[in-house]
Amino acid sequence: MSVINKMLKDLEQRQQPHDLSNVSRVQIVEDKDNRWKQMSVILLSLLIAFVAIAGGYWWYSNQQPKSEVEPKTELSLAQAPAKTQLTSAKKINHPDKTSEIAVAEQAVDTNQAPKSEAGQLEKQTVQPQPQSEAKSTTPVEVAAQAKALQPKAQQLKVKPETVAKPAKQEQKPVLQIKEVKLTPKQLAAKFYKQALQAQEDGELNSAIDLFSKVLEFSPAQHQAREKLAALLYGKQSYAEAMQVLSDGISKYPQHSMFSLLLAKVQYQVKQPLEALYSLEKIPNNSELATQKWVQIGRIAQQQKQYSRAVEAYNQLIHIEPEQSRWWLGLAFNLDSQAQYAEASNAYKQALLSSNLSPASENYVQQRLQQLAAHSLASKEDGSAQ
């Protein structure tokens, strides 16, 4: 510093004094009076700015990987001293401009330097010196030191390199559920399975609804119609059961089970004649022919349509001649029509079968005795005449 002061003295002796030196003296004297007020404002501003910048820098550095921020900061710190040396060297090589620059930069640096640096500048300016030294050394030293301290403030402005975006993660396969439209036949099969399960679980109302849906999608599902009619019959919903069966007969007359079931429902609701009519729709060669004639024989006998009952039992005997109950039914209806000889023969055929119950067998024997007595009386009456 002594070398610099000597050089400045020589330059000052060579050059005439100018107004700038007086300006620096006046400025230093005036700064003494107002320095404490200004310093308090400046220090407070610097403190707030420093906290805000430090907080922002801390937050921003946390967002970046440490490995990318730290090398950049170290590089700026390493380059800072070099910049300060270059700045001071330029000022020494151009002494004629330092006095002009020092006055302008002194006002700027007082607003930017940190608290500790401002204190150092104040000490350097207030120290008493000879008048010749005050004219030259003070502006140069203040400007040089302020310039040397600027890299420290610039360290806060370091912009870390942007972090490369992480590579896109491979998209994992996503399960996509697509609605598959089922055909009416598939829907009918689905509802039929559900209806059977509901029936097995005792949920009869649910089973009825599901069987109805089956018929909506597949009216030809005969088993669903039969089960639906049976469930309605069990709930004593006879009208609904008859409607379901009647629809089946009108659409599929060849399906004899609908007629048989309808006759049972009609007989239950005291419609025997309608039941006989439904039974007559079943063909004689149908596999349901036996059940058809059984129902006709029973209903006709109850309705005292003996000739129709006789026809039914003759059909049954033709199908199953070894069944004694068919012979017994034929004998009873013949006996009811006063056809005693044919009735007697039918009773005897019933006794020849071994599958009569004891009560039926006693009745047949008693009735044969009665018929024999009646036949003997008739012969005697005829011989007497």
Image (tube, rainbow, N blue to C red):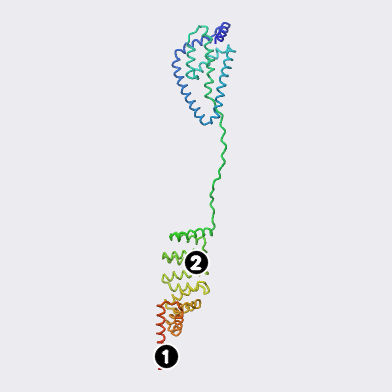
All told, the count of numbered labels is 2
Work out how far the residue at label 2 is from the one at label 1, CA to CA, in angstroms.
57 Å
Q: Nearer the viewer, mark 2 or mark 1?
A: 1
Residue depicted at x 50% and y 64%:
223
Q: Secondary structure at mark 2?
A: helix
Q: Secondary structure at mark 1?
A: helix
Where does the image place residue 290, in percent across and percent down from the top left?
A: 49, 74
Residue sticking out furthest to the top: 13
User: Which amino acid, by three-letter code, is at mark 1?
Assistant: Lys
Reply above or below: 208 against 297.
above
Where does the image place residue 235, in percent across and percent down from the top left?
A: 41, 64
Where does the image place residue 257, in percent across and percent down from the top left?
A: 49, 69
User: Which amino acid, by three-letter code, is at mark 2?
Assistant: Gly
Reply above or below: 168 against 91.
below
The disc at residue 248 is 2
The disc at residue 379 is 1
Q: Which mark sits nearer the N-terminus, 2 or 1?
A: 2
Where does the image place residue 17, in percent across and percent down from the top left?
A: 55, 7
Relative depth, front residue between 198 and 131? 198
**Quarter holding the N terminus?**
top right
